[in-house]
Image (cartoon, rainbow, N blue to C red):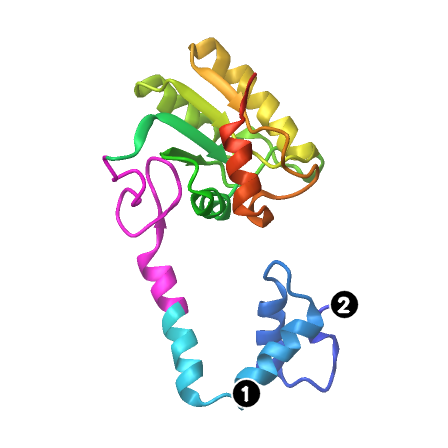
């Protein structure tokens, strides 16, 4: 039920609760709690939140090369000459990059798809950064592409389509080892398990 369903909520409260409720993982009750917390909070805390949101919208973009978060045209990882540019790890979301980086097991570069193929939800390859990956492999000297999509139905389907498109390009295509729980998301995997999955990746 939407957060605005309570007739006792005056319009400014209802609008903000509805806005919070559109965020992933936040239901109507949590959205209402956040609004009332802000109503009780000092003005300074509210202004800090407004400033942080404004800063986010004005300064943060997606890397033109790998589509991870950045403040410039390219992200910190793509700009790091110490990284192995010939190995690309393909993930679904920016949070997956952070999870893999915490493992300390990967020193290559990334490509963020910003989603996964899910036909039942109307999400196909043209909605993702799929073709940008193929163009990158065409244009750059890439030796290996690691498919690190989530180990669930949509992630496996995405990996299958990527493999089918990448193999004809002559690049080595590997998949994370099966240490990850089926149906899970990379962002919730512990660094040790994720590191082992990267180290034990298998050929496709």
Numbered circle sitting on residue 1: 2
In which quadrant is the N terminus drawn?
Answer: bottom right
Q: Secondary structure at mark 1?
A: helix
Label 2: few (<14), some or many (≥20) within 10 Å? few
Residue 67 at x, y percent in the picture = 39, 40
Q: Quadrant of residue 16?
A: bottom right
| Distance Cα–Cα, label 1 vs label 2 | 22 Å
Q: Is residue 8 above or below residue 153?
A: below
Nearest-to-viewer mark from 1 and 2:
1
Placement of 101 over or under 22, stated as above or below: above
Location of residue 126 in the rendering, given as x and y in whole percent from the top left corner: 52, 30
Of the two numbered discs 1 and 2 on the same chain, state the one appearing first in sequence: 2
| Residue stretch in magenta | 53-81
In the image, residue 68 lies at what x, y percent?
40, 44
- The verdict on residue 137 being magenta is no
In this rendering, position of residue 13 left or right of residue 107: right
Does 61 lie within the magenta span?
Answer: yes
Between 112 and 109, which is closer to the camera in this rendering? 109
Circle 2: element type: loop
Residue at screen point 45% across, 90% down: 42
Is residue 125 or residue 63 the one in the foreground? 63
Q: On the image, which quarter does residue 65 sit in?
A: top left
- Residue at 43%, 11% (x, y): give it: 169
Q: Quadrant of residue 122?
A: top right
Q: Residue furthest left?
A: 81
Identify residue for label 1.
39
The reply to whether residue 139 is in sight is yes
Chief secondary structure of the magenta span? loop
Q: Nearer the viewer, residue 189 or 78?
A: 189
């Amino acid at each position: 039920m939407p957060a605005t369903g309570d007739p006792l909520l005056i319009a400014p409260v209802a609008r903000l609760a509805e806005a919070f409720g559109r965020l992933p993982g936040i239901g109507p009750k949590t959205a209402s709690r956040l609004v009332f917390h802000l109503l009780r909070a000092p003005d300074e805390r509210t202004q800090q939140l407004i400033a942080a949101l404004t800063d986010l919208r004005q300064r943060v973009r997606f890397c033109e090369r790998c589509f991870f978060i950045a403040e410039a045209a390219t992200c910190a990882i793509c700009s790091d000459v110490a990284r192995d540019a010939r190995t690309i790890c393909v993930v679904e979301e920016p949070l997956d990059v952070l999870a893999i980086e915490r493992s300390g097991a990967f020193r290559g570069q990334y490509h963020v798809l910003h989603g996964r193929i899910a036909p039942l939800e109307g999400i196909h390859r043209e909605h993702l950064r799929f073709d940008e990956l193929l163009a990158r492999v065409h244009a750059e000297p890439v030796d290996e592409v690691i498919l690190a999509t989530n180990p669930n139905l949509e992630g496996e389907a995405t990996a299958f389509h990527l493999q089918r498109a990448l193999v004809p390009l002559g690049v080595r295509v590997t998949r994370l080892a099966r240490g990850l729980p089926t149906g899970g998301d990379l962002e919730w995997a512990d660094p040790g398990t994720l590191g082992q999955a990267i180290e034990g990746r298998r050929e496709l």
